[in-house]
Amino acid sequence: MVINELTAAECTELLSRVSLGRLGCSLDNQPYVVPIFVAYDGGYLHALSTVGQKVKWMRKNPKVCVQVDEIRSESQWTSVVVNGQYQELVEPRYTAELAHARKLLEKRLHWWENAMAERQLKAADNLIAPLFFRIHVESITGLRAQ
């Protein structure tokens, strides 16, 4: 097996195709990693969530990372890590950006289910407000095994 670094173009190409990633955030020296659906566009990863632990932590420490991968076998895989800054898309300040994030995410099958389903189960009949956010990409690195 040979492992090679990806170019920036190869990293962004993978980010444009893959929608499931793992979000890493931390607070008080404690890491937290959860799966999220993302949509990449123009230097940002866009996502949907509800207010819970990850959002509360990212509000306090906006430095985050996201890892996405494509695994064909144990010896054939591609992985990209994005480091960046969390930013909530709240109205009215980010109305256009929020609409853009929604449009990008709607292209993904079941884009809202993970973010809403668990929280809705816990809330019973109370409606849960969605929260759109984006991660401003500060750096991207990637590896490919062949």
Image (spheres, rainbow, N blue to C red):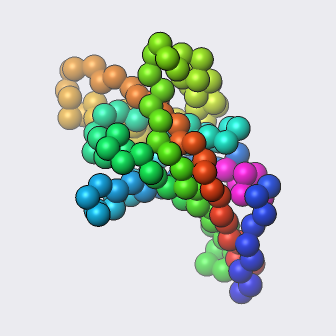
Query: In the picture shown, does residue 41 fall above or below 98?
Result: below
In the rendered image, which quarter is residue 29 located in? Answer: bottom left
Instruction: Count all numbered tags in the image, as a single digit.
Output: 0
In the picture, the quarter occupied by the N terminus is bottom right
What's the magenta bit mostly, secondary-structure-wise? helix
- What residue is at 43 percent from the left and 56 percent from the top? 24
- What residue is at 58 percent from the left and 23 percent from the top? 97
In the rendered image, residue 11, in percent from the top left (x then y), is placed at 72, 57
In the rendered image, residue 25, in percent from the top left (x then y), is placed at 39, 54
In the rendered image, which quarter is residue 100 located in? Answer: top right
Residue extending farthest to the top is: 92
Query: In the picture shown, does residue 125 fall above or below 39?
Result: above
In the rendered image, residue 78, in percent from the top left (x then y), is placed at 67, 67
Q: Is residue 55 visible?
A: no
Of 98 and 38, which appears nearest the observer?
98
Side of 123 where 133 appears, left or right: right
Of 93 and 11, which appears nearest the observer?
93
In the picture, the quarter occupied by the C terminus is bottom right
Q: Give the range drawn in magenta.
A: 10-15
Query: In the picture shown, does residue 9 fall above or below 121?
Result: below
Residue 54 is inside the magenta segment = no
